[in-house]
Image (tube, rainbow, N blue to C red):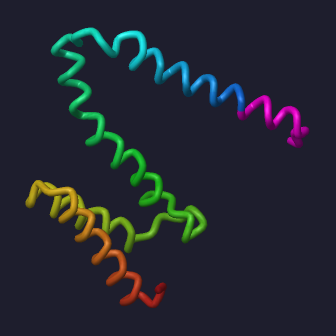
């Protein structure tokens, strides 16, 4: 599908307006009111949900292997998960995943 320059700019403007309205609905309209406890409790889990949601597709269908599952990346993700549960620290988990990934890629000759 080919888009004209005007269509591309229209899409950009509409997506920008939509993003602004979504943020304004949360921050501008209800930003100065106290929020219910249940909402505050749910918002605490947002960062915990975002990081795995961004990483999971890169582990299961990595672009580096043309979308084919890669055991090295899955082992690195498992190492990150285990260290994260064990240490309860995000940076330790990320470090363990990075070290395991690069070690696995080096040992398998993919690096």
From the viewer's perspective, is 21 left or right of 58?
Answer: right
Q: Is residue 47 magenta?
A: no
The location of residue 93, given as percent across then percent down, is: 21, 62
Residue depicted at 35% across the width and 11% down the height: 30
Q: Is residue 62 above or below residue 28?
A: below
From the viewer's perspective, is 98 left or right of 2?
Answer: left
Residue 29 occupies quadrant: top left
Q: How many marks?
A: 0
The foreground one among 34 and 75 is 34
From the viewer's perspective, is 38 left or right of 51?
Answer: left
The location of residue 7, given as percent across then percent down, is: 85, 32
The foreground one among 41 and 71 is 41
Q: Quadrant of the N terminus?
A: top right
In magenta, the rendered stretch is 1-12
Q: Is residue 110 above or below residue 88?
A: below
From the viewer's perspective, is 111 left or right of 80?
Answer: right
């Amino acid at each position: 599908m080919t888009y004209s320059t005007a269509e591309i700019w229209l899409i950009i403007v509409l997506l920008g307006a939509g993003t602004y309205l979504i943020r304004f609905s949360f921050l501008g309209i209800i930003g100065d009111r106290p929020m219910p406890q249940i909402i505050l409790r749910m918002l605490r889990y947002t960062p915990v949900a975002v990081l795995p949601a961004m990483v999971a597709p890169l582990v299961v269908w990595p672009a580096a292997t043309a979308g084919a599952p890669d055991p090295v990346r899955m082992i690195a993700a498992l190492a990150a998960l285990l260290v994260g549960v064990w240490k309860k620290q995000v940076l330790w988990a990320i470090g363990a995943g990075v070290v395991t990934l690069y070690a696995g890629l080096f040992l398998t000759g993919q690096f």
